[in-house]
């Protein structure tokens, strides 16, 4: 069986590996470390196809060496090398989106599924393989994921990164860069970004989330899809997310929201073109 033919069966059985143990069956920490040392080169096609499936189970592992250093890096390497055909890409996409469902008490599985999905979206940006309907569905899936994040844990010295908002933003960024993106899809991306630019739960970001949220917005701005008036309206709609004005400077939640809003606006301002920058300066003047 050739490498591509082995991957062709991926959609039929990949979901079974979503709940697999890590390291996957037939592998050990030592064998995976050796694989990384070889830059994830796997001579045997069937073994390589099995690893694409098996490593999904490591995306939720609490060990960053397995999760970040092996599973994410290996899948990204194979995606960027163009090693997956269209059937395999669809199977991987569907399995990863399946990992976004259900509870995730440890908080690793969903963010890292979203991060790998950003790489799946990148493949479509570089060499289109999704239909227009599939792309619209992925934009919706990415937007819903970003909107759903309520776990704001970031970096932990023992277990590494979770970073749900940032990883979801990376997924939106790859979609925003796609030249096939339509205005309605751009609108959906902006709506999702707005929900986390000033999160309802009033979590003060400290792990660079505002900068990551700004990226898809900046790339959309460069496409010229929106007028300055439209940008002013979108940015002005963020202001009410601060909450009750009577609590200004008297409430910790209000202060956290103000912190996030200013961090987001200033992150946008650093990379904005003049049209967006003008709208941003006007909005910043309205922030209490």
Image (spheres, helix red, strand yellow):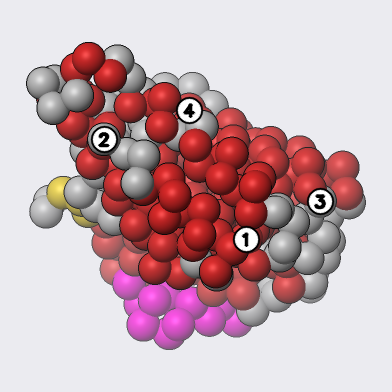
Q: Can you identify the residue that label 3 sits on?
A: 182
Residue on which the image places disc 1: 221
Q: Are marks 3 and 4 in contact (CB under 8 Å)?
A: no
Please tell me which of labels 2 and 1 falls first in the chain. 1
Q: Which residues are magenta?
A: 32-48
In primary-sequence order, the first of circles 3 and 4 is 4
Task: State which tag comes first along the sequence, 2 or 3.
Answer: 3
- What residue is drawn where x is 41% and y is 40%? 197
Task: Kindly identify which residue carries mark 2.
Answer: 288
Image quadrant occupied by the N terminus: bottom right
Are the residues flagged by discs 1 and 4 in contact, CB closer than 8 Å? Answer: no
User: In this image, 195 relative to 108: left or right?
Assistant: right
Give the label, 3 or 4, closer to the camera: 3
Label 4 sits on residue: 148
Q: Indicate the quadrant where residue 75 lies.
A: bottom right
Q: Secondary structure at mark 2?
A: loop
């Amino acid at each position: 069986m050739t490498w591509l033919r082995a991957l062709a069966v991926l959609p039929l059985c990949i979901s079974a590996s979503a709940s697999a143990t890590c390291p996957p069956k037939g592998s050990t920490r030592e064998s995976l470390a050796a694989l990384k040392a070889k830059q994830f080169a796997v001579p045997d096609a069937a073994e390589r196809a099995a690893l694409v499936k098996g490593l999904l189970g490591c995306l939720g592992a609490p060990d960053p060496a397995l999760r970040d250093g092996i599973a994410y890096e290996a899948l990204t390497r194979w995606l960027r090398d163009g090693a997956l055909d269209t059937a395999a890409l669809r199977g991987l996409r569907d399995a990863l989106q399946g990992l976004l469902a259900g509870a995730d008490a440890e908080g690793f599985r969903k963010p890292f599924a979203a991060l790998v999905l950003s790489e799946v979206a990148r493949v479509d940006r570089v060499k289109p393989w999704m239909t227009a309907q599939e792309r619209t569905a992925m934009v919706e899936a990415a937007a819903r994921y970003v909107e759903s994040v309520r776990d704001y844990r970031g970096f932990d010295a023992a277990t590494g990164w979770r970073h749900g908002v940032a990883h979801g933003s990376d997924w939106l960024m790859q979609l925003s860069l796609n030249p096939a993106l339509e205005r309605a899809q751009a609108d959906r991306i902006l709506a999702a970004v707005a929900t986390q630019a000033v999160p309802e739960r009033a979590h003060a970001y400290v792990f660079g989330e505002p900068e990551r949220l700004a990226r898809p917005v900046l790339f959309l701005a460069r496409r010229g899809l929106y007028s300055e008036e439209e940008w002013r309206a979108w940015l002005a709609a963020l202001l009410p997310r601060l909450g009750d004005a009577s609590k200004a400077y008297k409430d910790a939640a209000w202060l956290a929201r103000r912190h996030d809003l200013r961090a987001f606006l200033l992150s946008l301002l650093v990379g904005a073109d003049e049209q967006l920058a003008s709208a941003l300066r006007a909005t910043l003047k309205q922030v209490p």
